[in-house]
Amino acid sequence: MIKTDVLIIGAGPTGLFTVFEAGLLKLKCHLIDALAQPGGQCSEIYPKKPIYDIPAFPEILAGTLVDNLMEQIKPFEPGFTMGERAETLDKQEDGSFIVTTNKGTEHHAAVVVIAGGLGSFEPRKPPISNIVDFEDKGVAYMIKDPEVYRDKKVLIAGGGDSALDWAIFLADVASEVSLVHRRKEFRGALDSVEKARELAKLGKIKLFTEAEVKTLYGDDHLEAVVVKHNDAEKGETYVEVDQFIPLFGLSPKLGPIGDWGLEIERNAIKVNNAKDYQTNIPGVFAIGDVNTYEGKLKLILSGFHEAAVMCQYAYQIINPDKRFVMKYTTVGGVTGFDGSKKEAKKEVVQSIS
Ligand SMILES: Cc1cc2nc3c(=O)[nH]c(=O)nc-3n(C[C@H](O)[C@H](O)[C@H](O)COP(=O)(O)OP(=O)(O)OC[C@H]3O[C@@H](n4cnc5c(N)ncnc54)[C@H](O)[C@@H]3O)c2cc1C
């Protein structure tokens, strides 16, 4: 059982910044995310796009924003359960919660913060009748640890950046990499397309374009796939593989959170925005894109503000007998759980009279 003060569901920008705000109040955080990497929509949908409305950053790439948030929260040593979806929420007699993931990992916390954005991203699965039989037995829809594929025969399907980038990366890790795409042209970044074609020429990637994976074979584990070519003359190719990774993108769904007894309005969680962003379940907060209230703006800066407010109230739940006095970071500095310090600087402020 993982124990923490504040359990955050969703490691998007809102969830990540919550770690910082909670850390200032000496509250320890743990994050759960269904994706393999942190950053939510910023990492998954638009890492290379510039954002122009983050205060004090005239322009910042979404991916860089996530990197900076990860750097900012490092001193507060958050825990991560990545690649797992929060499935159930059970309130305990003492008011605390146990949240269990789809993989059975249990987390115990006094306060739960839902920062689930558009919901958990569910992989788009190709229409192959027996694909579910091979899930976790040779079929995976995201790559969490590339080392799993070392010296294995891997077949990736898809035509976007994920499929190209992983095919290129695994060319140096796996014993054999095949890339199957149903069209002739790829949708990914031009340099990735060129690199993949270059590796294909060198024989490091087997490229099948205008083709689709149709059938999977194996007993307890995947052993082979059949690739069907659009060109009837080329027919079908039988490819022996250990791992099949369809990377067809992800679609967001509020998912299991919708069954937790929370007040939901148009696929978002209603909160008390006049006070603390708490939901109808005391001790459960909802912040960022996942919540709704009158005047809600689904922007990154809204999530940051809501995190700051919400943490003050989480502190009161966790420390009912202590009074908290807010200090500016310029006054109190930042002291990480690792003992690292960013001291407040006492400087003489000159006043102009
Ligand atoms: C193309 C595009 C451009 C955008 N441009 C801007 C912009 O310029 N400026 C701006 O302010 N905003 C922009 N946005 C919106 C911005 O990305 C969102 O407001 C922001 O990502 C919300 O952050 P969040 O942390 O609340 O949610 P998200 O980023 O959606 O992260 C939520 C995380 O929760 C996880 N999750 C959900 N449910 C579960 C569960 N049950 N178990 C485990 N994990 C779960 C998800 O996997 C996800 O990683 C843009 C969005 C898009 C798509």
Image (cartoon, grey):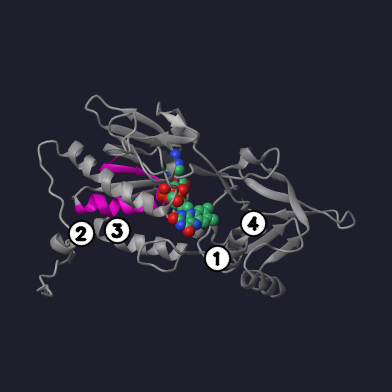
Q: Give the quadrant of the C terminus.
A: bottom left
Q: CA distance from mark 2 to mark 3?
A: 9 Å
Count the marks: 4
> Which SS class for mark 1?
loop
**Tag 3 residue:** 73
Residue found 67% across the figure and 45% down from its top = 126
Can you see residue 45? no
Q: Give the percent coordinates (x, y) of residue 289.
A: 43, 45
**Tag 4 residue:** 156
Q: Give the percent coordinates (x, y) of residue 115.
A: 39, 44
Q: CA distance from mark 4 to mark 1?
A: 14 Å
Q: Nearer the viewer, mark 4 or mark 3?
A: 3
Label for residue 173?
1
Q: Earlier in the sequence, mark 4 or mark 2?
A: 4
Q: Which residues are magenta?
A: 1-24
Q: Amino acid at mark 2?
A: Gly
Q: Earlier in the sequence, mark 4 or mark 1?
A: 4
Q: Give the percent coordinates (x, y) of residue 182.
A: 75, 55
**Tag 2 residue:** 336
Residue found 48% across the figure and 41% down from its top = 119
Mark 1: few, some, or many residues within 10 Å (few <14, many ≥20)?
some
Q: CA distance from mark 4 to mark 2?
A: 41 Å
Q: CA distance from mark 2 to mark 1?
A: 37 Å
